[in-house]
Image: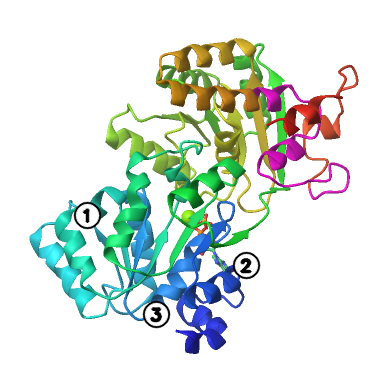
Amino acid sequence: MSAKKANLSGELKKYFGFSTFKGQQEKIIENLLEGKDIFVLMPTGGGKSLCYQLPALISEGTAIVVSPLIALMKNQVDAVNGLSSEDGVAHVLNSSLNKTQTKQVFDDIKSGKTKLLYVAPESLIKEDYLEFLKDVKISFVAIDEAHCISEWGHDFRPEYRNLKSIIDKIADVPVIALTATATPKVQDDIQKTLGMSNALVFKESFNRPNLYYEVQPKVNVDKEIVRFISQNKGKSGIVYCLSRRKVEEFAQLLQVNGINALPYHAGLDQKIRVANQDKFLMEEADVIVATIAFGMGIDKPDVRFVIHYDFPKSLESYYQETGRAGRDGGEGHCLAFYDPKDIEKLEKFLAQKPVSEREIGLQLLNEVVGYAETSMSRRQYILYYFGENFDPIKGDGAKMCDNSSNPPKLKDATGDLEKVLAL
Ligand code: ADP
Ligand code: MG
């Protein structure tokens, strides 16, 4: 495979039209082509897909891409097929395909046409798929959104846990795992579960210097949010609420206050949900009020604020949810409303869960409370949580949080870092 290595830039230009690699993409691809196992930790928008798409396109055989969501897979398949004049370079394999469609996919793989095969983990265990994949040439396996393997991640999916043994059945090929979740616990968990302790790890900074982090006590929250949004009229933003009921109530309240807002949650009729999402993406609505069901795979570059009406249940989720702001590099205001009573409610909710889940949940909550109550740089706090050191005076974006731009004078900050260190 290494013959292709020399001209990776040429291949990048040819397939994607980009003149330069982003971050460590080139190194990652080179090492994958050399047959190494790779682990990529890169924030959302960092360009992870290309790290497996490009090597797949220039390798012999088909790369299997494991991805958790049908919608994400479909987007990628369309994008990859759009890169080529030929059809069938990328396919999704799942149970929604009828017999003829499945045969087409199998034929395209056998003929060597298909370079990327997207599958959900629950499809991969299907006996007839497994049998078929065992007999064809697989170039490598990519596991996207690899944090789904870990209970410490923000999107645990039990189907991900058996991936290692399934992959071993299919082929002995390099594995590249990718995630935008970088807490040391999740990283560890992924590497152990996938048997990738010797993988080469590529980690990029998770700092988002253009995001401004702020926490306010949850007092007169409705009024505060209405005021904030009215002052930012016409700008695009997301308001996250914990419950579906709150989402609907608050979307209405915003509408009554002349704000062009729409609700989004998993309980809404599918048609309405999709329509609301599209209206937000097409700028027909300024604000989307949503549960955390909203956001995965959404790429709206100019989201200017992300408000948490209710506090998130982990710092990890908070980072992912606020990460949807300022994708274009412009301002992104991340404002969360904090009430210790809300945390108590979440704790009560956790009390009904099985012990292991409860313990993890409580620890994640502790960390998020630490973030809410800290008087140190919030950026430093978040990055520390991701295992990164951040200089709160000179670091990129150092002034971009409430505590740094307007340091709280009354509270004694000593002890805060110790609390973080104890995480
Ligand atoms: P991630 O999966 O890490 O969130 P994506 O793979 O979706 O990120 O990529 C984010 C964006 O970056 C996409 O629009 C993609 O086309 C773009 N991108 C990726 N690599 C490059 C590159 N080398 N040059 C320019 N744009 C890139
Ligand atoms: Mg991605």
Residue drawn at (54%, 24%) of the image: 258
Tell me, yes or no, whether the two marked residues, 2 and 1, touch with CB atoms within 8 Å: no
Q: Is residue 150 visible to us here?
A: yes
Residue 374 covered by magenta stretch: yes
**Does label 2 or label 1 sit earlier along the sequence?**
2
The residue segment tinted magenta is 369-396
Give the quadrant of residue 1. Answer: bottom left
Q: Position of residue 192 (x, y in %)?
A: 48, 49
Q: Nearer the viewer, residue 289 or 336?
A: 336
Q: What is the CA distance from the residue labelled 2 to the residue labelled 1? A: 32 Å
Q: Position of residue 295 (x, y in %)?
A: 47, 41
Label 3 or label 1, whichever lies nearer to me, is 3
Query: Quarter holding the C terminus?
Result: top right
Left or right of residue 328: residue 49? left
Q: Which residue is mark 1?
A: 94
Disc 2 residue type (three-letter): Gln
- Of helix, strand and loop, which one carries label 3? loop
Residue 59 badge = 3
Disc 3 residue type (three-letter): Ser
Disc 1 residue type (three-letter): Asn
Q: Nearer the viewer, residue 291 or 178?
A: 178
Q: Which residue is mark 2?
A: 24
Residue drawn at (52%, 12%) of the image: 345
